[in-house]
Image (tube, grey):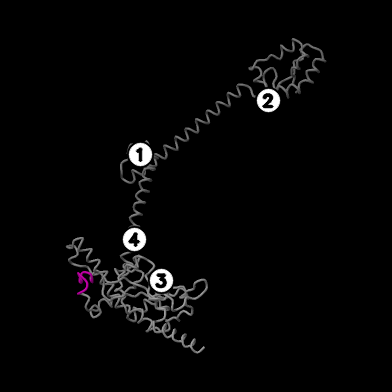
């Protein structure tokens, strides 16, 4: 059916047509679409044709007829949709409340099944209780993990090795090798050490991991003395052990890995060194390193290793080791450093070589002068 609209300003419709178009909302709500003007509307056919021509333009531009959009729904329909939306919201709220009540009922059933009485706070705030219990469980789990780690470290240190392994693994004790307990348990290998080491029996039990019956009765000072005595005893046993076949083999592994360091001499080209002491008695000299290539004696690089007593390695080990393994003796350096001044060698008779091993002796200097005087007399 054709829709009649009001033409724009300038072309007014007759009064009868305007009266017919002023319909109320109640009359429009019962109509599915806008109808044409009634046949008894007065006006000429030209007015109707003008109204028809302006119908599409007015509908597209203004989008309404007499204040009511033809594309919009009536008011009662909008109200009906609003009521439907409110009903949907109420249904959703009822469903959420039912789900919450079911969940609360399930929690109460589980509590009743476990035999514990439900708490008031569990009815009102079940989610908060769950989160708090979860956080407590996490904290307890973290504390338990830390305790497990500490206990595992302690048990690992106890299970992995004995006092000897612990002592050799300390920082600064890289020069020491692990002495076999069978060697320490042989009293013949410990001859004469009981007069050098205080608290000898306690120190020996500590080295061998033997429980001391009087350990609890010792004071802290006595305990420290026993620990230092155990270190001294092990060091003196170590000096005797490394000159045996098993001890040399253990030190060979360290020598091959350059655990004792390398010679600082330039022409030795990083030759590995061996530890040596200047005395076989304790508390006299610290340990030094011996270079098999240049036969030089040097201090260890590490200050902790330089503080080790030289008696714990003895004066015999490096030389007996090289004599036992002659294939390990390196060649002497082919080059030698020659002092020069502006490119000229320093003469051997110079004061530069006074009190120096490389300089010539007095007899050599006098014989050299005599040769020069004889040569001049012949000329």
Could you say which disc has been placed on residue 158 in the image? none
Is residue 199 covered in magenta? yes
Q: What element carries label 4?
A: helix
Q: Give the residue at the far top of this rendering.
A: 15
Q: Distance between the residues labelled 2 and 4?
A: 81 Å
Please give the residue where the numbered disc 4 appears in the rendered image: 153
Q: How crowded is mark 3: few (under 14 residues within 10 Å), some or many (20 or more)?
A: many
Q: Which mark is residue 122?
A: 1
Camera-nearest label, 4 or 1:
4
| Observer-nearest of 337 and 312 | 337
The residue to which callout 3 is attached is 261
Q: What element carries label 2?
A: loop
Q: Is mark 1 on a helix, strand or loop?
A: helix
Vertical arrangement, residue 363 with respect to residue 37, above or below: below
Q: Position of residue 252 (x, y in %)?
A: 39, 77
Q: Percent from the top left, x then y, of residue 199?
A: 19, 69
Q: What stretch is highlighted in magenta?
A: 195-204
The residue that mark 2 highlights is 71
**Relative to 9, does residue 323 appear above or below in the rendering?**
below
The one nearer the camera, 155 or 282, is 282
- Tell me how far mark 2 sits from mark 3, CA to CA: 98 Å
């Amino acid at each position: 059916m054709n829709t009649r609209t009001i033409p724009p300003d300038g072309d007014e419709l007759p009064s009868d047509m305007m009266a017919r178009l002023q319909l109320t909302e109640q009359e429009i709500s019962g109509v599915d679409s806008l109808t044409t003007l009634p046949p008894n509307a007065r006006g000429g056919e030209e007015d109707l044709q003008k109204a028809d021509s302006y119908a599409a333009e007015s509908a597209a531009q203004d989008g309404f007829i007499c204040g009511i959009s033809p594309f919009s729904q009536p008011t009662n329909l909008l109200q009906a949709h609003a009521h439907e939306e409110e009903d949907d919201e109420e249904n959703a709220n009822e469903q959420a409340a039912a789900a919450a009540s079911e969940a609360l009922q399930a929690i109460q059933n589980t509590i009743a099944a476990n035999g514990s009485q439900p708490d008031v706070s569990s009815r009102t705030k079940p989610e908060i209780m769950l989160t708090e219990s979860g956080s407590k469980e996490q904290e307890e789990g973290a504390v338990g993990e830390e305790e497990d780690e500490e206990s595992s470290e302690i048990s690992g240190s106890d299970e992995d090795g004995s006092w000897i392994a612990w002592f050799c693994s300390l920082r600064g004790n890289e020069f020491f090798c692990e002495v076999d307990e069978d060697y320490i348990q042989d009293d013949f290998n410990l001859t004469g050490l009981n007069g050098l080491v205080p608290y000898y029996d306690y120190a020996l039990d500590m080295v061998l991991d033997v429980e001391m019956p009087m350990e609890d009765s010792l004071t802290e000072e006595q305990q420290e003395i026993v620990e230092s005595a155990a270190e001294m005893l092990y060091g003196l046993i170590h000096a005797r052990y490394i000159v045996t076949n098993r001890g040399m083999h253990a030190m060979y592994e360290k020598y091959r890995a350059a655990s004792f360091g390398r010679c600082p001499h330039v022409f030795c080209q990083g030759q590995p060194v061996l530890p040596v002491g200047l005395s076989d008695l304790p508390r006299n000299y610290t340990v030094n390193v011996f270079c098999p290539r240049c036969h030089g004696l040097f201090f260890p690089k590490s200050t902790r290793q330089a503080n080790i007593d030289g008696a714990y390695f003895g004066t015999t080990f490096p030389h007996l080791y090289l004599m036992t393994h002659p294939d390990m003796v390196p060649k002497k350096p082919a080059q030698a450093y020659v002092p020069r001044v502006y490119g000229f060698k320093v003469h051997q008779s110079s004061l530069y070589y006074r009190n120096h091993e490389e300089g010539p002796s007095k007899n050599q200097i006098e014989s050299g002068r005599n040769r020069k005087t004889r040569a001049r007399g012949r000329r």
